[in-house]
Image (cartoon, rainbow, N blue to C red):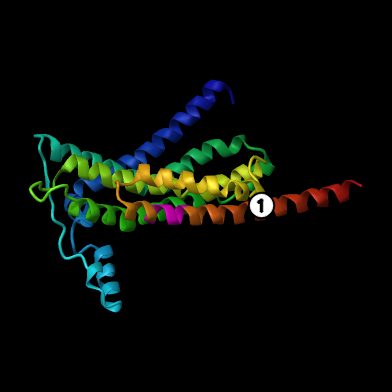
């Protein structure tokens, strides 16, 4: 294929991916009560799944402090177009999340024909694992990070005379940022897998820089979450766990790579 033919092929892959996002976004826009009332505003309600599980854990541990009975804040729209704008924005993000597996598959269909057979074998199952980690990150950000961050910020006051009245734009931006940030960070094992295959990363290198990684993880947690230690710790722990899993994945990949090289060396003798 010529360069222009490649561009034409890429254009159609992008159109199909954007089309899928648009379809899910339109569906989310129409289902306003579900998207806003249940999903977007869900973490701001005391009957949210995370708060109910915390309350049950508090009852089991005989500790009332884990049970969250009130979120002392209200959400307002201070701009005339605020609610409509956030309705469109939220629908787009919901569409992006739901269509991500298909959109990534479309991009992968364009990239994979340009790979060598060996590279295709290495990347087999990439769409499945990337999508799985993406959805795991979305679930972690939505059910763990977002509600606990909202609870902290709702109860934080510099003075009792200052009321927490959050703008709808600020609320939606915070929730989507937390969810998408977790979804991206959960791609670490896949990134390490491909870097190890390319010879850029080794388990020894990752173990050597483990302490540095802890500092980077804590900095990322501080940047990606509201300024409360609970949220930072909650996002830092799974990130460090993913880092440890990535070391294990890197070790397996490197071991298999060396075995294959030894087998090929013996066959050439």
Q: Which of 17 and 162 is in front in this view?
A: 162
Where does the magenta region start and end? 234-239
Which residue is farthest front? 159
| Residue 153 in the figure: left or right of residue 117 | left
The residue sitting at 61% across, 51% down in the picture is 207
- SS at badge 1: helix
Which residue is farthest right? 269
The residue sitting at 13% across, 52% down in the picture is 73
Q: Nearer the viewer, residue 185 or 1?
A: 185
| Residue 134 in the figure: left or right of residue 22 | right
Residue 238: name its quadrant: bottom left
x then y, percent, for residue 128:
50, 52
The residue sitting at 52% across, 21% down in the picture is 4
| Residue 52 in the figure: left or right of residue 21 | left
Residue 199: name its quadrant: top right
Q: State whether residue 24 appears in this view.
A: no
The residue sitting at 45% across, 35% down in the picture is 13
x then y, percent, for residue 190:
54, 48
Residue 96: name its quadrant: top left
Mainly helix, strand or loop, the magenta region?
helix
Disc 1 designates what residue?
A: 253
């Amino acid at each position: 294929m010529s360069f222009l033919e490649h561009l034409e092929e890429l254009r159609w892959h992008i159109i199909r991916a954007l089309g899928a996002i648009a379809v899910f976004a339109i569906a989310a826009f129409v289902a306003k009560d579900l998207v806003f009332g249940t999903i977007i505003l869900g973490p701001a309600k005391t009957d949210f799944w995370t708060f109910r599980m915390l309350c049950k854990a508090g009852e089991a541990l005989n500790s009332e402090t884990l049970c969250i009975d009130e979120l002392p804040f209200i959400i307002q729209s201070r701009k005339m177009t605020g609610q409509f704008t956030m309705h469109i924005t939220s629908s787009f993000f919901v569409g992006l999340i739901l269509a991500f597996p298909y959109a990534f598959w479309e991009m992968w269909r364009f990239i994979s024909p340009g790979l060598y057979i060996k590279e295709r074998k290495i990347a087999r199952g990439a769409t499945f694992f990337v999508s799985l980690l993406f959805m795991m990150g979305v679930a972690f950000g939505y059910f763990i990070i977002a509600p606990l961050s909202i609870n902290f910020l709702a109860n934080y006051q510099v003075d009792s005379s200052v009321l927490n009245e959050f703008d709808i734009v600020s609320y939606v931006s915070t929730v989507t940022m937390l969810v998408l940030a977790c979804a991206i960070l959960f791609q670490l094992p896949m990134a390490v897998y491909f870097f190890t295959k390319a010879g850029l990363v080794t388990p020894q290198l990752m173990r050597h820089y483990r302490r540095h990684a802890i500092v980077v993880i804590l900095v990322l947690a501080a940047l990606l979450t509201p300024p409360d230690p609970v949220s930072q710790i909650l996002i830092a722990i799974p990130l460090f766990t993913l880092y440890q899993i990535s070391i294990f994945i890197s070790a397996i990949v490197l071991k298999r790579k060396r075995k294959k090289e030894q087998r090929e060396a013996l066959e050439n003798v």
